[in-house]
Amino acid sequence: MNIRALVARPWIWGFAAAALVWLMILAISGQGGGQTVSLALSLAPYLVIVGLGQMLVVTAGPGNIDVSVAPIISLAGFVSVLAAFSTGSATVGVLAGVGAGLVIAAISTVAILGLSVPPIIATLAAGLIASSGTLSLANGFGAVPDPGLRSLLNLRPAGIPILAVAIVVVTVLVIALLRGTTYGRSLIAVGQNRRAAERAGIPVARIIAVTYLASGALAGLTGALLAAYIAPSADLGTRYLLDSVAVVVIGGTLISGGRAVPVGVWGAALFFILLDGLVNLVGWSSAAQNLLKGGLVLLVLFLAGGGDRVSGTSSRFRRRPRPAAVTTTTTGENTHG
């Protein structure tokens, strides 16, 4: 693969930015880089999980963003810890967290498909319901996270967090889902042109429903694992709303839909985690941190757009694939990873 072809890959810029920030941390701290990478790999998987769900939603086309993921994470954290504490089973707790995510996602889905409410409004309303449930549970909450699950999440054989390995496997499964299943090919087609997909006989409503349910389930899983790793709190998922959208876009997924890049979510997540470490290391104020983050995000997005220019096509005037994307060939063109 030559440099021109590599630069044209939409996922490369997130990893490049992460590597740059890592080098900056090494230059400032003067310490070994292995510990920094290990810490980043401990935190990034939580952002990757919710980011993969958000990626599926964004791939469904313009206007599709799930703003309920943050409240779901907070709610699922309390539900999972309470369920695990009550039953003595961490597995039951994780499943309860996923179930909480599915319930909130089902509310969004009914509003979107049954009541024709715009996705951002529907998920916002569902998120408010989740926030109400979180505040009710948080009042006098006395359960503690399962120690066995917490130990498992902190396990790092050879310095590599076991959760990171597990989420890499999940990422591979998402890639296989998008490339090799009817659902994945249909989702790409719906994102490219919803009306044409409907005319082609694709069950658009079913695809949209499955997509939002998947996003809710992954957000619930994030909350369950994050609450065991840290502790449940009412603002547990606050930072994951904007971050989940940012890692999807920086990772190369088209915000207009029709192209999903699961591998890019990893690069962008590592970039964000390392960037947090960098600004904390230099001790900048919150305002300066936000300014640096915003500038670097814009730079990465500009360079990612440059990948399209290098490949000889403009994102504004690029001819989009026809809804025949339900074929394996087109899916391969639009799902990088």
Image (tube, rainbow, N blue to C red):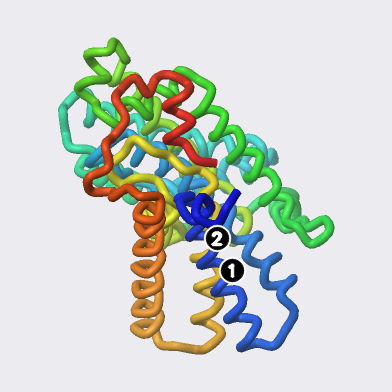
Residue 300 found in image quarter: bottom left
| 153 shown above or below 53 | below
Residue 310 x/y as whole percent: 39, 55
Q: Which of 273 and 113 lies nearest the eye of the viewer?
A: 273
Is 75 on the left-hand or right-hand side of 110? Answer: right
What residue type is disc 1 on? Ala
Tag 1's secondary structure? helix
Question: In percent of the image, x 50 and y 20: which residue is there?
Answer: 181
Tag 2's secondary structure? helix
Question: In percent of the image, x 56 and y 70: which residue is there?
Answer: 274
Residue 304 found in image quarter: bottom left
Residue that badge 1 annotates: 19
Residue that badge 2 annotates: 15
- Tag 2–tag 1 contact (CB < 8 Å): yes
Q: Which of 32 and 139 lies nearest the eye of the viewer?
A: 32
Question: In percent of the image, x 40 and y 80: which residue is there?
Answer: 289
For label 1, count other residues whose C-alpha is less than 10 Å away and answer few (under 14), some (14-19) or many (20+). some
